[in-house]
Amino acid sequence: MLKSAISSTIHSIKLNHSTPGDKSLASSAIFWFSIAFIGHLIFVLYIVALYGVSLFEGDFERWNSMMPNGYTEGDIAGNINIGLHVILAAVISLGGPLQIIPKLRAWVPRFHRWNGRVYIGTAVIISLTGLYLTWIRGSAVGTFVMDIAISINAVLIILFAIIAIRFAIARNFTIHRKWALRLFMVVSGVWFFRVGLMLWLLIHQRPVGFDPVTFQGPFLTVLTFAQYLLPLLFLEIYFWAQERAGQTGKIGTAVLIAVLTIAMGAGIFGATMGMWLPNIY
């Protein structure tokens, strides 16, 4: 499925670009999407293997192996919210990349519409459960500023979802596509956080800028905001290059995206080997 998805994306983009700048920009976008898709699929396997299997087996204590304050005995509302939060994260991490594939939209438009509805509905539910877990149940680790950053992420998800729906209903699909991509970036914030954290640890080979026990420190504070603000910034740069930049700007943006993709790939590798894969098998 992955090979077909990437091939269809490549084919559709090539049809619409001819200049060297356009081709380089399209190729860098395909490169980014391919690596991100692989990373999201591994993340989905991790969620299902750890949280899904433990939920099915009734081994709720296993949630706490990777999530502080994941399961709390007697806290029925909190446990339901966190279970819903992580299981729906698998749904959205798979459904999001599938919405981006142009050929899939063309081949199976009904799937695109229904998957989009599920994706947006899931995004809103995850945001609401995240706000509940942050402010009602309370975070076991982190700081108040990090809670603010996470809450901003949740609010942006809900806002972008509403805007994307509005333009889809109005059948303004050009603008809808932009807001759908913005929605994908902010929804993937928790994924970007893990990838960014593991890239940081790979570079330094030890915790730098934060305490791994309390999970507090300047690096984590910055990363909690950067997990969605940086992807949004680079997406806007891509939109600018695609629509208004000259050949030099397009090629420069393509190089930037390629470099960022390599860094993202390293972070995915670190997260896979250090966090996700050990919980899949």
Image: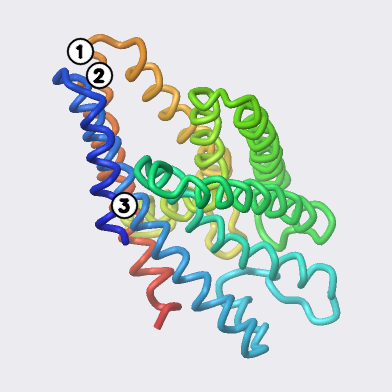
Q: Is residue 85 above or below residue 191?
A: below
Residue for point 42% across, 78% down: 280
Q: Earlier in the sequence, mark 3 or mark 1?
A: 3
Q: From the image, state whether disc 3 or disc 1 is nearer to you.
A: 3
Viewed as shown, does residue 144 lie left or right of 279?
Answer: right
- Residue under numbered circle 3: 5
What is the number of the mark on residue 250?
2
- Amino acid type of the residue that numbered disc 3 sits on in the rendered structure: Ala
Residue 78 location, quadrant: bottom right
Q: Residue furthest left?
A: 20
Q: Position of residue 64 (x, y in %)?
A: 63, 76
Dot 2 falls on a residue whose secondary structure is: helix
Q: Residues within 10 Å of mark 1 (few under 14, many from 20)?
A: some
Label 2 vs label 3, nearer the camera = 3
- In the rendered view of the protein, which quadrant contains the N terminus? bottom left
**Label total for image:** 3
Q: Residue at x 54, y 63 (%)?
A: 90
* Residue at the spot 62% in from the left edge and 53% down from the top edge: 118
Q: Which residue is mark 1?
A: 247
Give whichever of 177, 60 is nearer the camera.
177
Q: Are marks 2 and 1 in contact (CB under 8 Å)?
A: yes
Residue at position x 60%, y 84% in the image: 54
Horizontal and vertical percent for residue 154? 68, 43
Q: Are marks 2 and 3 in contact (CB under 8 Å)?
A: no
Classify 10 Å Cα crowding around label 2: few (below 14), some (14-19), many (20 and above): many
User: Dot 3, crowdedness within 10 Å: few (<14), some or many (≥20)?
Assistant: some
